[in-house]
């Protein structure tokens, strides 16, 4: 009996040490990740992730998804690590793992239902600390696709306020574009133009589409509006960073007006 007790105690102590080691490795990797030392981070995080550390899995997923490692963007590795980390603790999943799954799920969704199906994951990730504004904008779009324009506007306004003072304006103008799309769907063309203007100048495809269509609908320099819709229809989307859920709608509208002659 004493030998069995000693063996069990030894196993427990070993598991405890392994868990602590995984945590230490993850923290070292997290710090290297934060400092931009991505290859160093990858080495530590991979060791921790292989020991079942969910946080390390999430950071690996984020790194592979964003192309931060020397191996470049690897979406298969990203989703593999994120899924593994997610299953490590189903009671309280790691928010970065969940966020990566949600981001990839919406990015690669074949239809609007695919976006809506990932709404719960996106909200969980955001509300539990993975407060990426890209995720916040996607949540807004999910609500818009569900038909809840008020909730969509609430989220887009929230992200726009957060991003207003940031140097990188991608998420700021994306939130403006989403707000302009909400106004467009409400046929409030005046506010759609106001909200879309700066984002359209920045080159956001949703804003270009909203601005152009609103100009055509209000007969306000419609030829210029036609050019904006054409530019939106020809936009080359980045799979992860851009929101392309309205691409088919934009293309369909452009096809309907591409051969029309509008006054200058």
Image: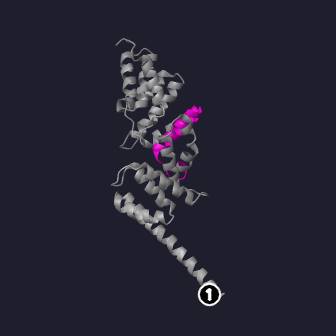
Instruction: From this view, report whether residue 23 is shown above or below residue 253.
Output: below
User: Where's the N terminus, which quadrant?
Assistant: bottom right
Q: Where is residue 16 drawn, in percent x and y?
A: 54, 74
Residue 14 part of the magenta-drawn span: no
Indicate the position of residue 175 as horizontal and vertical percent values: 46, 36
- Principal SS element in the magenta part? helix
Q: Is residue 186 visible?
A: yes
Count of residue discs: 1
Residue 25 % position (x, y): 43, 67
Residue 221 visible somewhere in the drawing? no
Per the image, the residue denoted by label 1 is: 3
Residue at 38% from the left image edge and 58% from the top image edge: 33
Q: Quadrant of residue 143?
A: top right
Q: Identify whether 60 is placed above or below 162.
A: below
| Numbered disc 1: secondary structure | helix
Pick the residue in front: 30 or 1: 1
Q: Residue at x 61, y 80 (%)?
A: 8
Q: Residue at x 39, y 60 (%)?
A: 42
Where is residue 112 drawn, in percent x and y?
Answer: 54, 34
Q: Is residue 67 left or right of residue 182?
A: left
Image quadrant assignment for residue 214 = top left
Q: Quadrant of the C terminus?
A: top left
* Most foreground residue, 250 or 7: 7
- Furthest toward the right, the residue is 1
Most extreme residue toward the front is 76
Q: Magenta part of the protein: which range?
A: 126-155
Q: Quadrant of residue 9 in the image?
A: bottom right
Q: How is the image coloured?
A: one colour
Q: Which residue ends up furthest to the bottom in the rendered image?
A: 2
- Pointer 1: residues within 10 angstroms few (<14), some, or many (20+)? few
Please tell me whether residue 137 belongs to the stretch shown in magenta: yes
């Amino acid at each position: 009996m004493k030998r069995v007790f000693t063996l069990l105690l030894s196993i427990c102590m070993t598991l405890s040490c392994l868990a602590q080691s995984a945590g230490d490795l993850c923290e070292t990797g997290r710090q290297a990740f934060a400092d931009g030392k991505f290859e160093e981070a990858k080495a530590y995080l991979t060791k921790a992730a292989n020991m079942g550390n969910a946080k390390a899995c999430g950071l690996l997923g984020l790194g592979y998804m964003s192309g931060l490692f020397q191996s470049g963007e690897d979406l298969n590795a990203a989703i593999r690590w994120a899924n593994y980390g997610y299953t490590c603790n189903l009671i309280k999943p790691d928010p970065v793992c969940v966020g990566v799954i949600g981001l990839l799920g919406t990015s690669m969704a074949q239809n609007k239902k695919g976006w809506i199906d990932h709404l719960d994951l996106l909200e969980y990730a955001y509300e539990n600390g993975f407060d990426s504004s890209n995720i916040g904008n996607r949540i807004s779009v999910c609500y818009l696709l569900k038909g809840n324009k008020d909730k969509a506007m609430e989220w887009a306004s929230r992200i726009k306020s957060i991003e207003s003072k940031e140097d990188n304006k991608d998420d700021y103008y994306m939130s403006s574009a989403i707000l302009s799309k909400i106004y467009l769907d409400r046929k409030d063309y005046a506010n759609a133009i106001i909200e879309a203007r700066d984002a359209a100048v920045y080159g956001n495809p949703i804003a270009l589409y909203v601005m152009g269509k609103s100009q055509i609908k209000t007969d306000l320099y419609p030829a210029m509006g036609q050019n904006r819709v054409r530019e939106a229809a020809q936009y080359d989307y980045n799979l992860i960073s851009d929101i392309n859920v309205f691409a088919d709608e934009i293309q369909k509208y452009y096809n309907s007006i591409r051969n029309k002659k509008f006054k200058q």
